[in-house]
Structure formats: C-alpha cells, structure tokens
Image (cartoon, helix red, strand yellow):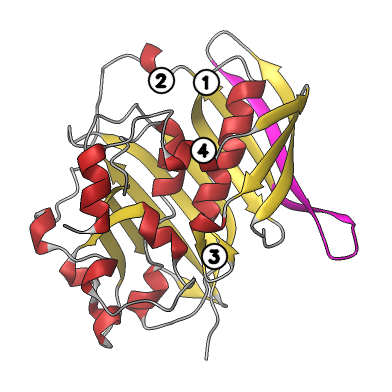
Amino acid sequence: MSEAASAQAVRATIGDSEFDRDTAVTRRAPGVYDVDLSPGWTIISAVNGGYLLAVLGRALADALPHDDPFTISAHYLTASQPGPAVVRTDVVRTGRTLSTGQASLFQYDDEGREVERIRVLASYGDLGALPDDVRTTATPLAIPPMEHCFGPEDGPAPIDGSSAITERLMLKLDPSTLGWALGAPSGKGEMRAWFGLADGRDADPISLLLAVDALPPTAFEIGLSGWVPTVELTVHVRCRPAPGPLRVSITTRNLAGGFLEEDAEVWDSADRLVAQSRQLARVRLG
C-alpha cells in the first residue's frame, strides 16, 4: 500500500489534519496573526501560492464576522520563504450577507527589514445560506477514472526536497495532459486531475484556495519548463464541496510577453462547480 493510500485509510478530518495545522494562525493582537510557513508545501524552495492564500484566508475568517471566502484576490509581491511570518488584517466593511477585508503577509529579509510578501482583498459570507437555484451552461468536468490516471508516485523518484508538496496531495493526472512528463508536450495549455489531500481530509472552502493552484503548471504542456511564479490570483468559491475527491481543470489560452493566464474550475463529487479561479503568471522563455 502506498504512503498516500495508508494515510487515506486513517483519514484525517476537517480541523484535524496536516493542512489545518500548517495553515493555522495565532492571534497576537486584534487583526495581527503569527504563522509558521511550513516547508512541506514547497516545490524546490518556493512556497506554493495556493497554500499561502489558504493561510491568509484563515486569518481573514477570524478577523471578519463571516467564515467563508466568496471571492479573494491576491497579489504576490515577493517570494515567501518557509518559516515565521506575520499576517495583518483590516476590516473594510461588514454587512449582513457579506463582509470585506484586506490582509498582508510579512516576513523579514536577511538584513532584518520587514518585507511584504502578499496583499489580499476578499469578501466573505455564509455559503450555507445561499439558495439552491443553479442556472448554468457549465458542464461537469470529464476525466478518466482515477485508476486510469497517474500521480507522482508513478514517475521517477524526485530529488530529495524538490517537491515536498506532492507528498501532501493526492494527485492523479489525466493521461492526455501528461505529455510533458514523457518529453512530448501536446502544445495545449491544459492540465486536468483528481485532487485531494494525502491524509484523506475532505475539502472545505479554505482548502479550495489550495486546490486551484496545486496542479503542475499548464506551461509544462505548452513545452516550457521551470518555475512559473504567480503574479495575481483571484478565486471565487461557489459552494461548500461534498465529501470525496475533487476534479480540477486548468487551461491557458494565451501566452504573450512572458506572461500567461490560468483559468481553473473545481468540481466536487456531486458534480457541482465549487470554485473557479484566474491567475496571471510569469514564465521563463528560451
């Protein structure tokens, strides 16, 4: 039995999982939170942007009178490093159905100066209070059965420390988006996968902030390699996900001037579109 399968046999719960512990924030003063960014959510030395957004999302859930992110937009200003950080929040407006706040994450550089890493503006509400009426032309994501898809464990062993985040995820990629891993990228900016947390914890609104940014970059299937740092990421959370694995689709239609967009859709086991996102990212050409 694989490590991920063993962890899923135990199944962590929402509120008691590695993801919850690693995104936890400690209130130091009103609107000020201490956090320790875990090295477990890195690729090489880069802290994953979705993980960082989940950390800021937790701080805002505590600072605002509503618990659930409806829309959250982040600008990634400087590269975050594993280790201590401070999140400062500010309540912009509160209402009966929506509250809006902003948050920034800070760390110290080698000379002891405080550096802002990320700045976020978000609106929160109560997803459980939304009406059930759905009118959409979106169709549930079609992807081969999980047993016909492939994960990191099916490829060569990674270099130690190069992909810590993959040990914490259950990722099973659609074979039609895996040409890059075989040295034959399709040229299409598409990535599709089954997604979950390796310890079996079900998804919730905060973990959806991770899900939209956890797949390999679409740039790989376009034929590029290397780090694809996020410049800006906006996530819309549409409803609370049902238990079970998620299906995630990410597409890119336009790479120009060294920047590309990634549009993500996240579908739950009940065939509901539970989250959407768009990000702008840089790529290294040549």
Judged from the image, the secondary structure of the residue bearing numbered disc 4 is helix
Would residue 111 be counted in the magenta stretch? yes
Quarter containing the N terminus: bottom left
Counting residues from the start of the chain, the first of labels 2 and 3 encountered is 2
Residue 102 pos. (x, y %): 70, 33
Main SS of residues in magenta:
strand
Residue at the disc numbered 3: 281
Q: Position of residue 76 (x, y in %)?
A: 65, 55
- The residue at 46%/34% (across/down) is 206
Label 1 to label 2, Cα distance in Å? Answer: 9 Å
Circle 1 is placed at which residue position? 67
Q: Which residues are magenta?
A: 98-118
Q: How many marks?
A: 4
Callout 4: few (<14), some (14-19), or many (20+) C-alpha neighbours within 10 Å?
Answer: few
Disc assigned to residue 55: none
Q: Which residue is mark 2?
A: 127
Q: Amino acid at mark 4?
A: Arg
Is tag 4's residue or tag 1's residue first in the polypeptide sequence?
A: 4
Image height of 184 relative to 252, above or below:
below
Q: Quadrant of residue 79?
A: bottom right
Image position of 105 (left or right of 240): right
User: Gap between marks 4 and 1, in whole Å?
Assistant: 18 Å
Q: Is residue 102 left or right of residue 161?
A: right
For the residue pair 235 and 203, the one nearer the viewer reads as: 203
Examine the rendering and report whether any part of residue 152 can be seen. yes
| Among the two numbered marks 4 and 2 on one chain, the one whose residue lies closer to the N terminus | 4
Tag 2: residue type?
Leu
